[in-house]
Image: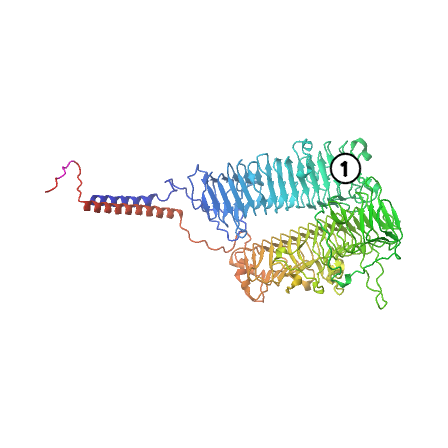
Amino acid sequence: FGIAMRGLFLLLVLCLLYGGTTGRGHHGGNVPTPATPKPAEPATPPPAAAGGGTAATAHPDQPSKKPDGADTDHWAGEIKESLHVTRNVVVDSGVAVSVKPGVVITVAPNVNITIKGIVAMAGTKDRPITIQGERVKNGTREVTGGSIRLAKKGTASFKHVRFDSLGNEEAALRVEGRSTKVSLSNVQFSNIPGDAISGYRGTILPISHAVFSHVGGYGIIVSGSDIGNLVVTDSDFADIGANAICGLRFQGALNVTKTTFTRTTSYAISIDGDGPFHVADNTLTGNMGAFACRKHSLTATEKVTDVSQASLANNVITQNSVDSEGDPWSRGNLIYIHGCTMRMEGNQITGTNAQVGKKGHPNLINLFDAHMELQGNNITNNTQFLYILNVGGSNSRVKMEKNFLSNYNPKKDNFEIVNEAAGVRVNAKANWWGTSDEEGIKKRILDFGDGGEKYGVVDFEPYYEDAGMTNVVDWNSNSWDPMQDADEGDDFSYYNYYYYQPSNDQVRNIVEKEDVWSVDKVLDESVWIKKDGSLTILVDEFSTENVTIRLGPGVGIHVDGVLQILGQPGRPVRFVPMDWKEGSTDYTPWGSITFSKSAKGTVVEAAYLGSVIRYTSFIGGGQAPPPPTSTAGKPGKPIPSGLLRLYGPNVVVENSIFSQSKTAGLLTNSGNISVANCVFHDNEGSAIAHHSRDPLQVRVSFFMRNQKFPILVTHSTYNITQSSFLDSNSGVLCIRRRRTENTAIPVPVPASTEDAPVSVFQQNMIAGNAYGAASDCWGDTGDDSLLLLAFAGRQTSVSSNVFRKNKAPPMAVRRKASIYLFTGDNIVNMSGNVVDDNAGALYLSRKAVVTQTWQHEPSQVYIENNRFTNNFFFRLYVNIPGRRLNLNGNTFESNEVTDDPALKAIPLLEVLGGDFTNRPMAMKGNHFLGNEGTLLIIRLHDRAVAVNNWFSNPFSKHELEFANPDATLFTGIGNFWGDYGGDAASEAELVTRIKPRTNGQPIPKRWYSHWITSDGTQANPDPEPTRVSNQDKANATLTFLVVMCAGFVIVLGVVIGLYCKVSGRTYTVLDIEEPKPMD
């Protein structure tokens, strides 16, 4: 036993000595680790990262296998600290690596990261992960960090990750393995010398909320048949050196939606392949070329016959120029379609610059061997082009209808369309060509009739005779049912209509049975359709002429029964004054067509019960009847009137024109009203005055030169989408507050705000309008304010609209009156709007008193992802008591608040009146850049948190003021305040950009903590906890294990010795004879 104990003691000593000399290597081996290189000073500072790690050199916490060679490291495990990578890195198959938020990975020049296993990089909005390359000069060439490459079965997930200065003229992120898969959301690629993302094998999962800026090559390029579908949504591309998105010989499906493209040096989106695609609801501005599609097989047009498989739809394409970087075929166009089968509809294409392009004649839209349908596009003010549409190629099949084309330049004598495809007929029927004169239209079309066999034929007849007959033929209305209004009155006494009921003595033209008019009529007396009567006015399907109804002064049609007005495309039913002539304004107006409370419906198409008005022109009417006489014998108030007055039935109005009314265009008091693909222009009152409690729907319609707010709504919810308000309307939209305290009708309270009705104003173009008198909307004649839009009364969503170049008159600009771009008292969502080069303020205010009248109360208000740029006399004022404001992702750039020195105390943004006790106002990711005309950019009054915002407004004295007595209610973290460093002197300068509530009051550091410095780093980061090195951990672990093993052996030896002693047994060694037991 003694010998055994001495042996164990010697073994313990040897183990301790071994652990002290060999416990420094990798797990599983004693290969010495090369000395850790010192961190190199990065040429480009890291981007701002709130709470990010330090730039100290480190390795993953769990170093992996030994390197394959001197220039390769292998990663595995979890990365918590920032890294400086100087050798190529491989994540092997079957190995997982995760990167924690805030980590900064700096990659040396030409160093690549190859992913064959699984990598998860999950940053946060406040603490993104940054992968940045070092930039060094190599002669005249600058070299950056290498690429991130997915190979074999590599899988990577990137969320809230920034990629900067990577790729070294290749791609920053390369998807190359056939079984690879990558996920990207909330990522940012910037300062990339080559392509940002390239893929030719594997799968790229849908990309959302990504930002690509200052990319030397392609933003995203996918090629070949081994790469999966590509989906991009809610993203932003700016300053791209080639196409922002490119599919080269691409066989997958491409979907691009709700994305902004700015300043690309070639077509923003280019597709070369046979796969389906949908490019919709995007905004393209300032690009050299907007969209290109080319099939690499020129017979593709004959192979693919379904145009619904590919579309370019509902995009806003403004202020771009033509491509100058493509091949000789595609160069010199805004939109280039070669061999593709697709539909192009609902796009707004305006203000394109043709000066940059190929020699010869640039085209706005070039169609070659294309199978195309163009429908409902608004193509205007592209006057620098000789050809707006150029059709070529013997395989071309083009159908275009309901498009609004107005690009004629008399100085250039240009053409809306040229057909260079000899032997091909272009179906261009039912479009508006910018003029109603047939000879004028012929001058704008270059075809066979002008150049003989060199050109093909353009069939343009029938054509629309007035602006805006750009419409969709069929509208599915079979889900509507008749509804009776319980209360025929109106809450506004001013709008209680005098209800005119004719008698047999007053009207001799009476319709008591069924009657049909299909020829021209002259009416010198009014017509009365009685309850059992039915009148159908129609254009025969085989007729080549219009049906024109001429009405004498004040003459109208009163409907107690059924009236159907059914024109044909290009051949509308026209209601005109008796003495009306084409193009003349010297005539005597007729009266109105009035549907009474008792007007009956008729079963028309898909069992729709109601009245239908389709392909009709109402011109030069709207003369109001004489006001009723009061009991005192004095004249009463004027009677509201219009071309069409609706007192009860549900009515669908499609493909119609309302023009030159002396009062309103369409006036309603009851019933569901749907207006689609109509044009309202040159009316002296509102285009649509809707006083019904039933919903109003307006879509794909045009409003031009109306002298009062084109749309006036006093009661109901509304849905106004994809419409254009252009060319000097006086105001745009007036939603008046509903005063239900004046009525006894109970209003049900919904179970939650989600159940409340929501009104929508979405995807509209508001450009070139004048401001209306606020008194015309609010009814307060003592207010001389000017107003463009007013939203009131219900939860309202204002999203994805474009407000551009709406101007106030000179007197108002000189501050003789208040100017409001729009006001709103119950807006719950204002997102994705572009507000550029307008005058006026945005005023969102809400009363604190909540009654049954205002039951639709949102608990939160969202103002997100809007762009407010180049506006003057501009400010955003928000007063929403009891609600939480989410102000995120907006850009306020180059706006002017005022040029009056006496008003410069007014801030650009002011938020007050909120009660954010439980959840503070969120203000994240906004950019306030280069604004002027004010001493203060932002004033906040209530609990708020500001994170990752950019405040850089050198023309203003202060960036922010928190005007609440309790300074602890405001927190600012990770914001950029200007060109300041991280030292004490810079901090002192930064503090001067924040206005104290009272002079001399110190600025709490919580208002500007962890600010982003001028070199992109974070000032005063939280100290890192002291960490135990991997070497010390290994030594301690080995020592512990040796001691435990020795202790176990000792205990085991003692137990065995005790057992032997107790049992009385004797053991011998060598050949000594065992003694005999004693007697």
User: x, y percentage for residue 476?
Assistant: 71, 45
Task: Give the residue at x 72% y 32%.
Answer: 395
Instruction: Specify the principal SS of the magenta part.
Output: loop
The part of the image, by quadrant, that contains residue 176 is top right
Residue 383: in sight, yes or no?
A: no
Which residue is nearer to you in this view: 247 or 647? 647
Horizontally, residue 224 falls left or right of residue 85, namely right
Q: Amino acid at mark 1?
A: Asn
| CA neighbours of label 1 inside 10 A, class few (<14), some (14 to 19), many (20+) | some
Q: Give left or right: position of 585 versus 117.
A: right
Mark 1 falls on what kind of element?
strand
Q: Name the quadrant of the N terminus.
A: top left
Quadrant where the C terminus is found in the figure: top left
- Horizontally, residue 843 falls left or right of residue 1079, namely right
Percent x, y of residue 983: 51, 57
Residue 941 visible in the displayed image: yes
Looking at the image, how many numbered discs can be counted on the residues? 1
In this view, which residue lies farthest toward the left? Answer: 1079
What colouring style does the render use?
A: rainbow
Of residues 19 and 234, which is closer to you in this image?
A: 234
Place residue 895 in its image quadrant: bottom right
- The segment highlighted magenta reads 1071-1075
Say left or right for 507 vs 991: right
From what the image shows, is residue 750 above or below residue 1076? below
Q: Is residue 278 magenta?
A: no
Q: Which residue is mark 1?
A: 427
Q: Nearer the viewer, residue 1026 or 278?
A: 278
Residue 654 screen position, x and y as percent: 76, 47
Q: Is residue 1073 magenta?
A: yes
The spot of residue 539 in percent (x, y) is 82, 43
